[in-house]
Amino acid sequence: MCGILGTVIHDGVNELRETLITGLKAVEYRGYDSAGVAILGPNGLFINKRAGKIAVLEDHLGGDVLSGTVGLGHTRWATHGVPSDNNSHPHQDFRERITIVHNGIIENYAELKQELMTMGVEFTTETDTEVAANLIGFYYNGDLPAAVCRAARRIDGSFSMCVMAKDQPRMLIGIRNKLPLLVGHGPGVTYLGSDVTAFLAYTREVTYLADGEIVVIDGPACRFMDWRTGEPVVKQQERVEWDIEQAQKGGFETFMMKEIHEQPAVIRQILERYLPSEDAPVYLPGLDDFAAERETRLISLVGCGTAFHACKVGKYMLEGLAGVPCRVQLAHEALYHQAPIGKHAVTVAVSQSGETADTLGAVRTQSAIGSPVIAIANVVGSSLTREADLTLYTMAGPEISVASTKAFTCQLTVLTLIALWVAEKFQRKPPEELKRLKTELLGIPAKMELILESKYTLEKLARVYRHVDHFYYLGRGISYPVAMEGALKLKEISYVHAEGYAGGEMKHGAIALIEPGFPTCLLAPRSNLVDKMVGNMEEILSRKGEVMVVTNVPQRFADYDVHVFPFPDCPQVLSPLLMSLPLQLFAYYSAKLRDRDIDQPRNLAKSVVVE
Ligand code: F6R
């Protein structure tokens, strides 16, 4: 959940303050409780760390030039110990010889701490990271890689760490166990980062560390080993396709607004790659071979949060279009519930980051019983993509805002394409119906653009509801998970309590809350369920509740005293792709009117890499 960054200058001394602060800001979405830097230079070791966002740290650093040979930076999402200056990273061993930044959790920290204390080690923070620093310090006798490997072998849990020693002015160690870490190879500088955006401003040449690997950066030299055995590992350098412009706001006031606006373009890009025209068959690289080798009787979809909602929409698509039975589980539930599925059930794991611990755990549980795994992921080279038998990339580009928007609609697009691919390959629908759906799908980006053009209507609607504390979102069928996603968006960025319900469930309890002024957002795409949604609306209005309707059959609601946001017509199965945008924008403006920190909502972090 934390963002980490390291730099080693190959030769001489460089100004490192700017590099570290720029890099940390790029990974701030991973955690923003506190931040800190350490710079080892000709004048010794300089450390500054502060509770609060990186801007607070920047204020404390002032305008001083901070030159050095090795630098470390960290932005924290607190797990052990409150966010405070003292608990912020970097941490040191008690003799102040070793300095580290860490992402993850050391599960046996209490027992290690006890052991170290009996040997005279003193602790000054509440963190598990300080235990790792002291363990490395305890083993350090001038051979830093050996000390780090020895300490790592004693640690239970998930971690990626960057470690430096005060008496090794050109050396930085990166070590990975279950959490991402990669090396960036820049001209004259080598970087370590918890993700590529940490150093994307400087280089796109990277080497990904796998679990159990350590990298020793020593000036310009860079060698990789297995930290359990000490054996050298040969690694391939890769070039990432993302560029720095994609990771910047590009004139928008927030990343979230930028990412909402990117949706037509990124979906066009997916379609160009996987469905170039309505006459072409859907092409999903690797899926032919994957399917040829297996008989699939069930698809088991897993994900968390927004990705879970994508899975739920995917079930309606895969069952409705392709006739494949599906089950959907929250990844953290799948992790501890062994369902009676086996090799005939394909697991589809959906994740933007590809690093969500619960999703990785569910994938491991399901593959342990023989279920092959398809990942639908956004981040290239992420852990999920390495563990899956096949990855279909969502190609959304970097998603920086904590609240997911474009990743969600890209996940929906890939799921639609999988459903069309199955329907086409196994003749589950007549060819003319499939061609019509493909034509409609290719038209979705242009319809998204129309919705974005009417965004100010959603700003006005957000104003209407600017003082409410609660919101219901109702949908039926494929719109039900979209309602859940709409509620999640509102909740996470505006802090308004919101719940997404299946329309039919209202009278089984939820309707008890409806009273004069209580707002409900109804999702009513053209379908056989519109009359049922009208029924829900009438029940709410008769109790003097307020209703806002997102629909592509606005005439059906014209005679009622409700707010209507019309969206372009489309087949029901594609409506989640369009309805998501007004819900994202409504949540956005609601948060803005409440003066919330939209890109970095409280208590959250972008990648949830701990269970
Ligand atoms: C909500 C949101 C989260 C993520 C969830 C899974 O806007 O972003 O609910 O969807 O934490 O993350 P990934 O997709 O990275 O596995």
Image (spheres, rainbow, N blue to C red):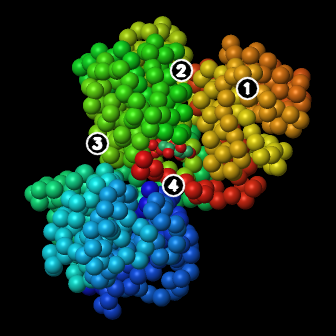
Contact check, label 1 and label 4, Cβ < 8 Å: no
Q: What residue type is labelled 3?
A: Arg
* Residue wearing tag 4: 605
**Mark 3 and mark 1: Cα distance apart in space:** 44 Å
Q: Is residue 464 left or right of residue 172?
A: right
Residue visible at 47% across and 76% down in the picture: 86
First of labels 3, 4 by sequence position:
3
- Note whether ligand 1 is within 8 Å of mark 2: no
- Residue 316 tag number: 2
**Can you tell which quarter of the image residue 113 is in?**
bottom left
Q: In 3D space, how far apart are the residues under numbered discs 2 and 1 (Cα atoms)? A: 25 Å
Instruction: Give me the residue at 73% from left, 26% from top.
Output: 509
Q: Mark 1 points at which residue?
A: 509
Label 2: few (<14), some (14–19) or many (≥20) C-alpha neighbours in 10 Å? many
CA gap, disc 2 to disc 3?
28 Å
Residue indicated by mark 3: 386
Amino acid at the residue labelled 2: Tyr
Residue 182 falls left or right of residue 253: left
Q: Which class describes the residues within 10 Å of circle 1: few (<14), some (14-19), or many (20+)? A: few
Relative to 447, 549 lies left or right: right
Q: Earlier in the sequence, mark 2 or mark 1?
A: 2
Count numbered badges in the picture.
Answer: 4
Point out residue 520 in the picture as x, y percentages from the top left corner. Answer: 77, 33
Give the CA separation, mark 1 to mark 4: 33 Å
Does 598 sit above or below residue 276? below
